[in-house]
Image (cartoon, rainbow, N blue to C red):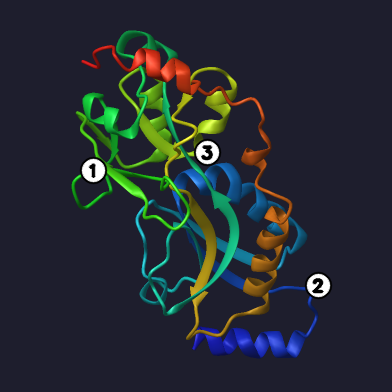
């Protein structure tokens, strides 16, 4: 009923510059705070008749049952009932602190990770494993089961634990970039990186898509069309492969 009411309002107003109604959006917490929120707030300032509910949660939500107009999701999509617009790539990086590297060494290969403390993502429903890019095009990604005493369900918490020297972590570059630039983290195995994700704007194909939702999606696509801001950082500190090979002989525990 609300969708039909919004459709009627859109048809009556007919002015693309004057958006009305309410939007309900779901997004991951870290990305929502650092990158999505500022874009949404500028959008609201330009369209004062719009109302917005933004819910930040790292768990996936059901868009239909939750009454969401739009969600931002990061990863590989499996729900064929959703329409998806890609916004930007989300590269992931393997990181540790300089202090951890000094005391425990760094891996020369992904297999070396089995001997290191790893900071695991707590939302995983199966044994923690990390996935890395294949050795050659057309091959399947490589997977390694990792071990660690710390499990966290938020990327920023994982980054902070890595900065504290508690182990190695795989986190999105949009979370790690400032710490890499400041030298608080080192990027490891940069020539064999973790597999990348994609950031999408998704919405149910069974619901009416209001002019407000369409305008918001177009704004997000435009905001990232020249590249993600975290990718523009050319000052990330990576451990060279030769340094990793020398340090790989150090005991990790």
Is label 3 in a helix, a strand or a loop?
helix
- Asked if the residues shown at circle 1 and circle 2 are in contact, with their CB atoms under 8 angstroms apart, the answer is no
Where is the C terminus found, in terms of image quarters? Answer: top left
Between 16 and 115, the one nearer to me in the picture: 115
Q: Which mark is residue 128?
A: 1
x and y, in percent, of residue 141 in the image: 37, 51
Q: Quadrant of residue 80?
A: bottom left
Q: Earlier in the sequence, mark 3 or mark 1?
A: 1
x and y, in percent, of residue 108 in the image: 37, 25
Q: Tell me if 79 is positioned left or right of 238 in this view.
A: left
- Residue under the image location 58 percent in, 88 percent down: 5
3 or 2: mark nearer the eye? 3
Q: What is the CA distance from the residue labelled 3 to the residue labelled 2?
A: 35 Å
Between 213 and 24, the one nearer to me in the picture: 213
1 or 2: mark nearer the eye? 1
What crowding class fits label 2: few (fewer than 14 Cα within 10 Å), some (14-19), or many (20 or more)?
few
Q: Which mark is residue 173?
A: 3
- Asked if the residues shown at circle 3 and circle 2 are in contact, with their CB atoms under 8 angstroms apart, the answer is no
The correct choice, above or below, for 253 with respect to 143 in the image is above
Q: What residue sits right under mark 2 in the picture?
A: 17
Is label 1 in a helix, a strand or a loop?
loop
């Amino acid at each position: 009923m609300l969708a039909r009411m919004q459709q009627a309002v859109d048809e009556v107003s007919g002015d693309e510059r004057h958006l009305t109604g309410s939007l309900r959006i779901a997004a991951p917490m870290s990305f929502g705070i650092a990158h999505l929120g500022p874009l949404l707030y500028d959008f609201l300032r330009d369209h004062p008749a719009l109302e917005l509910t933004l819910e930040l949660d790292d768990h996936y939500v059901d868009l239909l049952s939750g009454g969401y107009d739009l969600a931002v999701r990061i990863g590989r999509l499996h729900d064929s009932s959703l329409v998806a617009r890609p916004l930007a790539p989300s590269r992931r990086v393997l990181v540790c602190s300089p202090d951890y590297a000094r005391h425990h060494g760094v891996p020369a290969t992904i297999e070396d990770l089995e001997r290191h403390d790893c900071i695991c993502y707590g939302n995983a429903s199966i044994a923690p494993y990390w996935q890395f890019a294949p050795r050659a095009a057309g091959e399947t990604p490589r997977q390694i089961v990792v071990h660690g005493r710390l499990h966290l369900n938020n990327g920023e918490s994982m980054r902070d634990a890595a900065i504290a020297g508690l182990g190695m972590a795989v986190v999105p570059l949009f979370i790690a970039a400032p710490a890499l630039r400041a030298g608080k983290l080192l990027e490891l195995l940069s020539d064999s990186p973790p597999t990348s994700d994609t950031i999408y704007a998704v919405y149910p194909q069974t619901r009416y898509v209001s002019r407000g939702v369409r305008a918001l999606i177009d704004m997000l696509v435009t905001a990232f069309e020249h590249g993600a801001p975290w990718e523009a950082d050319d000052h990330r500190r990576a451990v060279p492969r030769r340094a990793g090979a020398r340090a790989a002989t150090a005991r990790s525990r």
